[in-house]
Image: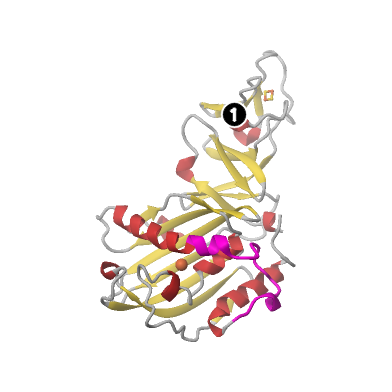
Amino acid sequence: MLSEFWHPVCFSSDVAGPKPFPATLLDEELVLYRSGGRVVAAKDICIHRGVPLTFGWIDGDEVVCAYHGFRYGADGRCTRIPAQPGAVIPRKLCLHTVLAEEKYGVIWICLAQTPRQDLPDWPELDDKGLKRMKMPAGIWKCSAARHVENFNDLAHLSWVHAGTFGNRDLPEVRNYDVEVSPTGMHFEADYDRYSIEDFGRKGALEQIRYTYDVTFPFYTRLRLLFPDGRNFVAYNLPSPRSARETNVLFLLTRDFDLDESDESTIALQTRVLSEDKPFVEAQKPEELPLDLSEEFHIRADRFSTCYRKALVGLGLGGEIVA
Ligand code: FES
Ligand SMILES: [Fe+2]
């Protein structure tokens, strides 16, 4: 069922240079390269003798297999068989390609022939007037759905993030509503947190409006609206490599400090994510339990209970396993 959705697998900038790019999505090993101005994504298997194309290299608009030198270009079509240079190459000599789209500086893949819904609608990511940053990708030993729930969990902020912005003196989560649509979810809540300058100390508190927009199955835009009207937005893209391994891609934008470097923001954000990681990787069971009777839920978990029901509604009965 998950294969029917678009999933991000890497940043656009990853598919460049002399080597084809390897990616894993839902246990499928893929090769990515550029040809004819488009990204080609295919199963990482040369159709001649089954060697991974990621052993090979890029030559212009083509990927070259390292075993016998077959070359593949636009749409995954074989363009040359060096051991038989005059041969006519039939059209069906083609890699097993999958759908690939490049948007927001990210490469999205759908393993099914017809995607079930569109890519997330985040047009502001193309707005040149914003400062845009990308975090280094990282593999987490967790399911993507557990990662989503952690990212959208209000009650953990005061506890897990007490070493940075979290405010353990104000752990109460005020009541909030969750809207569920056929393609995603939306909710908003206020959180009194320590300002960045006071990270890890008891300093100034600021009330921040957190607005979450989830695109099914795993992708979240979180907007932080500061009291003075500034906006900081995080895009959490946990890409499911397998049932228990997730490649976390993360983008950030802000509409202030446009000329300042990315470094301090990325360092702070890295620190915040490293506070989450040991918790999410340790959760048992690793798959998100979709049967609500399996874990205990409190009022603050409204997102989580709605999310689990929504995943069941999408057809993810039982546990998320490959
Ligand atoms: S296995 Fe790739 S060219 Fe033979
Ligand atoms: Fe967190």
Residue at the far bottom in the pictured view: 175
Q: Is residue 101 left or right of residue 92?
A: left
Q: Is residue 88 left or right of residue 218?
A: right
Q: Is residue 281 magenta?
A: yes
Q: Is residue 104 left or right of residue 263?
A: right
Q: Position of residue 176 (x, y in %)?
A: 50, 84
Q: Position of residue 316 (x, y in %)?
A: 71, 65
Q: Is residue 211 magenta?
A: no
Q: Is residue 155 above or below residue 246?
A: below
Residues in magenta, as a range:
277-297
The residue sitting at 43% across, 59% down in the picture is: 274
Residue placed most toward the observer, 303 or 281? 281
**Residue 262 visible in the snapshot:** no
* Quadrant assignment, res 317: bottom right
Q: Is residue 299 above or below residue 151?
A: below
Question: Which of the image's four quarters has the N terminus?
Answer: bottom right
* Quadrant assignment, res 215: bottom right
Quarter holding ligand 1: top right
Q: Is residue 312 above or below residue 239?
A: below
* Mark 1 residue CB less than 8 A from any atom of ligand 1: no
**Amino acid type shown at disc 1:** Phe
Q: Is residue 127 left or right of residue 197?
A: right
Question: Which of the image's four quarters has the C terminus?
Answer: bottom right
Disc 1: which residue: 55
Q: Secondary structure at mark 1?
A: helix
